[in-house]
Image: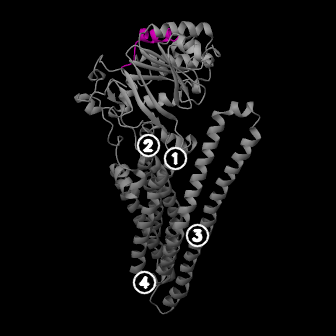
Amino acid sequence: MTTAPASPTSSGIASMKAGGSGGSGGSAGSMGFGAFTRRFVLPLWPWYLSGTVLLAAINIINLEIPQLAKEIINKLVSNDALTDQSRVALTIVGLGFVTILIRTLSRILIFWPGRQVEMRTKSYLFSRAVRLGERFFNDYGIGDLISRLANDVSQLRAFYAFGVLQVLNVLFLTVFTLAKMSAIHLTLTVLLLIPLVLTFVITRYAMPKIHAYSRANQDAVGSLTNRVTEAFVNVHVIQSNAAQAAFCQRAAQQNEDVFKTSMQLVYIRTFIWPLMSCLAGVSQLVVLLYGGHEVMVGRLSVGDILAFNVYIGLLTFPLTALGIILSLLQRARTALARIGAIDQATPEAEPSDTVEISVLPGPLPSPEIEVRQLNFSYPGSASVALKDLSFQVAKGQRLGIFGRIGSGKSTLFQVLTRLYDPPPGTVYYRGHDILDLAPGVVRREIGYALQQAHLFSATIKANLTMGLSPEPGIEALRTAARAAQILGEIEAWPAGWDTEIGERGIRLSGGQKQRLALARMLLRQPPVMLLDDVLSAVDQATERRLIDQIFALGTTMLIASHRTSALMRCDQILILDDGRITAQGSFDALVKTHPELLSTK
């Protein structure tokens, strides 16, 4: 090593340093209901407030109906003339219609913000997830993450829509009903509070169990979703190995886990809800016994007893609704804990919008890329994947990297592009430690084309221009496609650039996928290109033409391949074995001592 790294003195470099958490801040998983509500729910307070006012009006109206019925019964018992019976009856009917209209509107006003909470939370979590590093996606299955964004966030929507509605209904109905009952007979009302107290005791006991069962159920759903996603993505591998029965057996076992955890919730709800309904029946028994005695001594009228029974019927709803609210609350708590894994993970630093690539220095005495005594292990792994690597790549140089599968070629490229961070002071780009550059800047400077072409269910044009703004013109697209040796095929298809390629490019051959992914990188014109065995699925004639095109660009290039025909024209070749550089030199020099270079020619 002869070149010392230049110090990052440019003001642009300072603004590109990785630091901070990125994203929009806050932690849904760690902040709990209070902070989550302040962040995602409080901005929607006008809707909730309007719905709350209407719910209060509904409950006031509902409590007037028993009073009207009481008036009719008392007149019947006392043989008074019912001169205004039609008016009272019409009033009750009219109040019923008004209740229907207001209740419908109140549900709209409260359910709509619940949907907004769901939409905003999903958008926020997705925007954070796509900024997370490779390590995060190695720790969580894709199906499990999908379950967290879909199923768990839906649990939050259920609580902040239907759950909020039920909480408000219980609050208003309980307070207003007890106030009406107290106005009729205070002692009898106090006696009826005993079942309510028992209800809260039961709720307090049940909450931890429901929370534990909810977490187990939602984790089981996530595992099953991950299994199903994995099977569908790799269905051709399963079929080619006749492994359908084994995968079905595993999926069935996980499906049974979902069933068992669901039934645990069902069992506890089956116990709680009937018990709460039974307590409502106890309340009616108290009214009949004690209230009947009060009628006999003249302290209550028959109409009062009727009104009390109606009010008890109204109080039955809060007793049973508490079970529903309890279930929704615990599921929402579990959902917050699960989506917290996404929110609490540290995203990669984002480059400043004001940073231009031009702030990086131009040609310098230092090499374009320099690796110094690099030792790297994957997070959580005890084995060393790259061992004491040191090499330089000058501007415009083509460096070939040869090695068997598992020798460390792809790992090296992932480190060079900061998909995984190297130790400080081991990897430099134009004299700057790449840890001093935001990942987004590194990846704009260093293009990376993988052997496993990653394409999206969209048009060819959309796949090529993904993330570019402004969108390149047709000539730029044609130039990149021509260099990747796929222009003729694209323009021969009936829809041309608007051809839909299906999920993961399923309508394309392996070679077409690789060349399309290569064209996507070429369109971005990065100063440095990393080609990770991108020619493995193309025929030799296409390979020769493709190499001619990309070598003519004069770009700094690192090419990892098993096919030595792709490496013969490189200026230098590194031979990797078990993460170490075992040889370095020109192709002609190395082939004399390493005949394996010709074995895959």
Left or right of residue 395, residue 197 in this image? right
* Lower position in the chain sequence, tag 3 or tag 2: 2
Asked if the stretch drawn in magenta spans residue 289, the answer is: no
* Lower position in the chain sequence, tag 2 or tag 1: 2
Pointers 2 and 1 in contact (C-beta within 8 Å) = yes
Q: Amino acid at mark 2?
A: Leu
Left or right of residue 249, residue 279 in this image? left
Q: Classify the position of the C terminus by image quarter.
A: top right
Q: Secondary structure at mark 2?
A: helix
Q: Amino acid at mark 3?
A: Ile
The residue at 52%/30% (across/down) is 580
Residue 530 lies, in percent from the top left, at: 47, 21
Disc sitting over residue 272 in the figure: 3
The residue at 46%/79% (across/down) is 193
Observer-nearest residue: 23 or 261? 23
Asked if the stretch drawn in magenta spans residue 482, the answer is: yes
Q: Main secondary structure of the magenta part?
A: helix
Disc sitting over residue 148 in the figure: 1
Q: Is residue 373 visible?
A: yes
Disc sitting over residue 125 in the figure: 2
Q: Is residue 87 visible?
A: no
**CA gap, disc 2 to disc 4?**
53 Å
Residue 1 lies, in percent from the top left, at: 37, 25
Image height of 239 relative to 512, above or below: below
Comparing labels 3 and 1, the label whose residue is closer to the camera? 1
Comparing labels 1 and 4, the label whose residue is closer to the camera? 1
The residue at 48%/79% (across/down) is 303
**CA gap, disc 1 to disc 4?**
51 Å
Q: Residues within 10 Å of mark 3 (few under 14, many from 20)?
A: many
